[in-house]
Image (cartoon, helix red, strand yellow):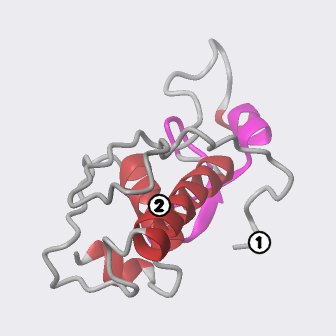
Amino acid sequence: PDVYPNKHNLDLSTLIPSRPSHLKPIYVTILVRHGHRTPIIPLPNQSRSEFHSVWGDCHNLKNELRPCDIGDLTPLGEYQMFIVGQHIRQQYVNKDHLLPITFNKNADTLMLRSTFRPRTKLSLYRLVQGLYPDENLQTISQH
């Protein structure tokens, strides 16, 4: 999506460690933390308008833009998680053929979990959108 910063360099060279070419994974567990977020505690005496002037707009779980609040996933955080999903796709779909080419919410080859916090749910959505770019939030949220 075009709201993501496009000049931010993310070094993901160690995201997926190298391994000998004769080995092929049969099972992978990936744990990630949420992407970049706004502070969870505002500065002392900082008004909501000051907070918003610093942090701008963030997406909610309905993919609507609205003023960022404390602890929200930022557009940079969304971008980070999308890129992580692309790297996972490159390795485990394209190279290793461990995951299917298309997302199937009924398949038992992929299990997705998140905590209840909106920033972690949105992080997971963006990661899966990088992993399976043709899927929408509605399909992913029902998985």
| Marked residue nearer the N-terminal end (1 or 2) | 1
Vertical side of 29 occupied by 39: above or below = above
Disc 1 crowd rating (10 Å Cα; few below 14, some 14-19, many 20+) is few
Q: Outermost residue toward the front? A: 22
Q: Amino acid at mark 1?
A: Asp
Identify the residue at horizontal 59%, vertical 35% (top origin): 38
The front one of 39 and 52 is 39
Q: Quadrant of residue 11?
A: top right
Point out which mark residue 88 bears: 2
Q: Quadrant of residue 55?
A: top right
- Residue 61 can be seen, yes or no: no
From the viewer's perspective, is 56 left or right of 112? right
Element class at badge 1: loop
* Tag 1–tag 2 contact (CB < 8 Å): no
Identify the residue at horizontal 28%, vertical 57% (top origin): 25
Disc 2 crowd rating (10 Å Cα; few below 14, some 14-19, many 20+) is many
The front one of 35 and 56 is 35
Q: Find residue 45 and report its horizontal and vertical position in percent.
A: 66, 15
How far apart are the two marked residues, 1 and 2, measured between alpha carbons? 21 Å
Q: Find residue 9 and report its horizontal and vertical position in percent.
A: 79, 45
Identify the residue at horizontal 38%, vertical 48% (top origin): 120
Q: Find residue 130 and report its horizontal and vertical position in percent.
A: 53, 69
Point out which mark residue 127 bears: none
Vertical side of 17 occupied by 111: above or below = below
The front one of 137 and 93 is 93
Task: Give the residues drawn in magenta, as a range.
Answer: 50-72
- Residue 74 can be seen, yes or no: yes
Asked if residue 98 is among those painted magenta in the image, a careful observer would answer no
Q: Find residue 125 and report its horizontal and vertical position in percent.
A: 42, 65
Give the residue pinned by disc 1: 2
Q: Amino acid at mark 2?
A: Ile
